[in-house]
Image (cartoon, rainbow, N blue to C red):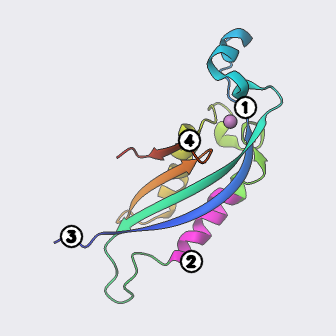
Amino acid sequence: MSKKVAVYRREHFNAAHRLYNPQWDDATNDAVFGKCNNPNFHGHNYELEVKVSGIPDVQTGYVMDMKLLSDLIKEHVLEVFDHRNLNKDVSYFEKLNPTAENIAVVIYEILRKQLHKKFDLQVRLYETPRNFVEYPAS
Ligand code: NI
């Protein structure tokens, strides 16, 4: 019998971005990205949900210490993303369009390196209350 349990940590960060493809001309970028292509950037209040699945430890009853999970997210994600311009300040997006999809993949890759391989990881990122993405897709 599988006793895998999922635990979730919700965090928040504010960041600015601009969506565009440098290989396209302005008209094409405007047509595809609309307001998100504003050259002066725009901001979002991102909500991040990190899901970690594993078998609760026999001694503690925890899948993992939630304080540790919170600290990992703060140190490796929020410190890097919060109150930043993703295009200009965050090296991951030097050549990667900072869409919600790509931000979620980047956050997953950052946290995957910090978590023991016995855990499954999934990241959900809300760019607005109604628009959100999940990686890996389930
Ligand atoms: Ni946007």
Disc 3: which residue: 2
Highlighted range, magenta:
66-78
Please say whether residue 23 is visible from this viewpoint: no
Q: Which mark is residue 67?
A: 2
Q: Quadrant of residue 118?
A: bottom left
Residue 25 image offset from top left, x and y in percent:
70, 10
- Say which label, 2 or 3, has the lower sequence index: 3
The secondary structure type at the circle numbered 1 is: loop
Q: Quadrant of ligand 1?
A: top right
What amino acid is found at the position of numbered circle 2 in the picture? Lys
Disc 4 to disc 2, how far (Cα)?
28 Å
The residue nearer to you, when weighing 7 against 86, is 7
Disc 1: which residue: 18
Disc 3 to disc 1, how far (Cα)?
44 Å
Q: Residue at x 67, y 16 (%)?
A: 29
Frontmost of labels 3 and 4 is: 4
What amino acid is found at the position of numbered circle 3 in the picture? Ser
Residue 9 image offset from top left, x and y in percent:
53, 66
Q: Residue at x 78, y 26 (%)?
A: 38
**Label tally:** 4
Disc 4: which residue: 131
The residue nearer to you, when weighing 115 against 69, is 69
For the residues bearing labels 2 and 3, Cβ distance under 8 angstroms: no
Disc 4 to disc 1, how far (Cα)?
17 Å
Whether residue 28 sits left or right of residue 54 in the image: it is right
